[in-house]
Image: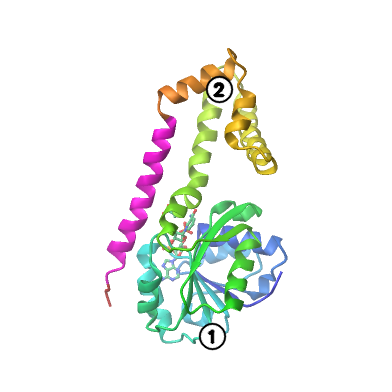
Amino acid sequence: MKQCTLAFIGGGNMARSLIGGLITNGFAADNIHVADSSNETLQTLTNLYPVRTFTDNTAAIADAEVVILAVKPQQLQAVTRQLSANWSKDKLLISIAAGIRLDDISRWLGQEQAAIVRAMPNTPSLVQAGATALCANDHVETEQHELAESILRAVGLALWVKHEQQMDAVTALSGSGPAYLFLVMEAMQTAGMELGLPEETARLLALETAFGASKMALESDESACVLRQRVTSPGGTTERALDEFEKGDLRGLFSKALTAAASRADELATQLGQDHE
Ligand SMILES: NC(=O)C1=CN([C@@H]2O[C@H](COP(=O)(O)OP(=O)(O)OC[C@H]3O[C@@H](n4cnc5c(N)ncnc54)[C@H](OP(=O)(O)O)[C@@H]3O)[C@@H](O)[C@H]2O)C=CC1
Ligand SMILES: O=C(O)[C@@H]1CCC=N1
């Protein structure tokens, strides 16, 4: 993949997933700078990958072409303001923070012309099975578009959304999505154990079923609905289970859950988009 110097500000959960996926895909660890306020976090990272670590955010971005802000939304304003003094307009900034808007980041950076991309990845990036949506401001050049996309494509699916507003829906669907599916796996494992299966048997069957269904849906020309119907023999076992899901309004629950997540992203943007110096 195309190499560049890439600086992560924040070396927590999501940065770790992206870094692991990038290195496995041939990105040179030496070209990855990671800054974090916690020495322990940096140590954990260097135990896993030979990246270059920094406790000074400014030093980490000095010769970086791309800077990925991977701190919590609550820390984004302070971190961006801190970087503003040493920002040069040839750099590309990628924020992966939930909610926080392009215009707010640009204002905190103090540079109206700064090239900024918002990306919403997810943790399966660690195993090259991530799903990321991106959107850019008007100052991102074609080459920078390609660079941002190539970084995220190295760890899975990467696609662009037209309107920044859609990033809240993306966050609710695929950003947070792995957690919903892990919950489903946990619930299936527990239910299997309640029916008498040993823990490890229930765990393996639940996980492999989730993996197999996902792989099959991705590789098939048929919709998930048709694939579901093929498992569901009339008068059989699946039908009984699906009836219970419909009675419990599983679809309605997903709709409510994703709406709540998207609203939280919007709430974060409103609350944290206020300036504090
Ligand atoms: N986790 C996920 O699945 C996803 C997360 N995101 C987004 O990614 C971002 C990071 O999330 P996540 O990785 O889960 O969070 P983490 O808390 O795991 O990582 C953030 C890291 O940044 C460090 N940090 C805090 N302040 C600073 C600072 N001033 N300078 C440098 N480093 C600092 C934190 O250290 P300390 O802990 O000591 O404060 C922590 O190690 C968030 O904005 C989130 O919205 C996006 C998609 C998916
Ligand atoms: O829970 C969160 O806020 C972050 C954003 C998407 C996934 N994790």
Secondary structure beneath dot 1 equals loop
Task: Pick the quarter of the image with the N terminus.
Answer: bottom right
Q: In this rendering, is residue 110 above or below 129? A: below
Residue 202 falls in image quadrant: top right
Which numbered circle lies on residue 250? none
Q: Distance between the residues labelled 1 and 2?
A: 56 Å
The answer to whether residue 274 is left or right of residue 134 is left
Q: Name the residue under label 2.
A: 193
Residue 123 placement (x, y as % from top left) = 55, 53
- What residue do we see at 48% from left, 65% from top? 70
214 falls in the magenta region: no
Asked if residue 218 can be seen in this view, the reply is yes
* Crowding near the residue tagged with mark 2, few <14, some 14–19, many ≥20 C-alpha atoms within 10 Å: some
Residue 40 placement (x, y as % from top left) = 51, 63
- What residue do we see at 64% from left, 29% from top? 205
* Amino acid type of the residue that numbered disc 2 sits on in the rendered structure: Met
Which of 257/81 is in front?
A: 257
Q: In this rendering, is residue 203 above or below 148? A: above
Residue reaching furthest top?
A: 235
* Crowding near the residue tagged with mark 1, few <14, some 14–19, many ≥20 C-alpha atoms within 10 Å: some
* Amino acid type of the residue that numbered disc 1 sits on in the rendered structure: Asp
Q: Are marks 1 and 2 in contact (CB under 8 Å)?
A: no
The answer to whether residue 152 is left or right of residue 175 is right
Secondary structure beneath dot 2 equals helix
Residue 11 placement (x, y as % from top left) = 52, 65
Q: In this rendering, is residue 63 above or below 103? A: below
Report the span colored magenta.
250-274
Q: Which comes sooner in the sequence, label 1 or label 2?
A: 1
In the image, the residue with mark 1 has its CB under 8 Å from the nearest atom of ligand 1: no
251 falls in the magenta region: yes
Q: Mark 1 points at which residue?
A: 90
